[in-house]
Amino acid sequence: MPEADHTQKEKQFYTDIQPKNEGFFLKGSNSYDWGMKNRLSNIFDPKSGKTVMLAFDHGYFQGPTTGLERIDVTILPLIEYADTLMLTRGILRTTIPATYNKGIVLRASGGPSILKELSNEQLAIDIDEAIRLNASAMAVQVFVGGEFESKSIHNMTRLIDMGNKASIPTLGVTAVGKELVRDAKYMRLATRMLAELGCTYVKTYFVEKDFDTVVAACPVPIVIAGGKKLPELDALDMAYRAIQAGALGVDMGRNIFQSEDPVAMIQAVRKVVHENENPRAAHDYYLTLKNENNR
């Protein structure tokens, strides 16, 4: 039995201090339960409210993508600079050290390869697997306007229902097919649909015009996809403009791991996302680190 409280010290109930009732720091997330918020805090930095996600899940439909031929060689040096990793369960189990203690976003949909119609995906993991792997979120591809639009949306809503039961967030990823126009009108439609149907946050592409309206119309956080490989300054500029328009981070892959110096590039991206550094200064920082690394 515990000992009785015989201390002579006067008890302090701090009756002059009102209990704090602070809202959660992340857009649209205040009504989630504790477990969901805690997992989101492993993805988004509570200090800046933003995230640098490192995406290297490309192999689930592309195979050994350039820069990802040996993830143990090219990606492991980068993970300490990422807020969270976007990857498949296969790579998580085979390659990522179990001592990694930041966010894990699991690719939860898949099926066809790059040789087939990509929109015909299905759910590729169940909720028990996500729990076993200590996932901070699960990611599902959604093809608004694609041939299998309804099927991909059904994949998403099933994943949301499973995730809500276990307090695991769902990241809805807006896929853009060759036949679809990448403009603000389409992005407003796709991101709003995903948010309305229950996604915890959304990944989409940055568009040059009116991206701020895409963010404003979406009631949950938006992070941008890195997209195709760009020159380093252009990639930093894209990230900067997205953040200034209201995006809460990036999920960047090729523009980091295909960079001439990936370690320097991910640190420069962090400068833009977490410190609001302008693209030119961030690029100078990248060049400085690159020169130091090559000595």
Image (tube, grey):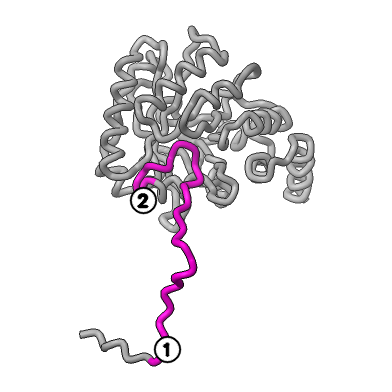
User: Which of the pair 210/275 is nearer the observer?
Assistant: 210
Residue 203 shown left or right of residue 47 in the figure: left
Question: Which amino acid, mark 1?
Answer: Lys
Provide the secondary structure element on which disc 1 rests.
Answer: loop
User: For the stretch drawn in magenta, what is the main secondary structure?
Assistant: loop
Q: Disc 2 marks which residue?
A: 34
User: Which of the pair 140/60 is nearer the observer?
Assistant: 140
Instruction: Determine the residue positioned at 69% across, 41% down.
Output: 276
Q: Residues within 10 Å of mark 1 (few under 14, many from 20)?
A: few
Judge whether residue 108 can be spotted in this image.
yes
Q: Which mark is residue 146?
A: none
Query: What segment carries the magenta color?
Result: 8-36
Mark with earlier residue (1, 2): 1
Q: Disc 1 marks which residue?
A: 9
- Residue 200 screen position, x and y as percent: 40, 35
Judge whether residue 262 can be spotted in this image.
no
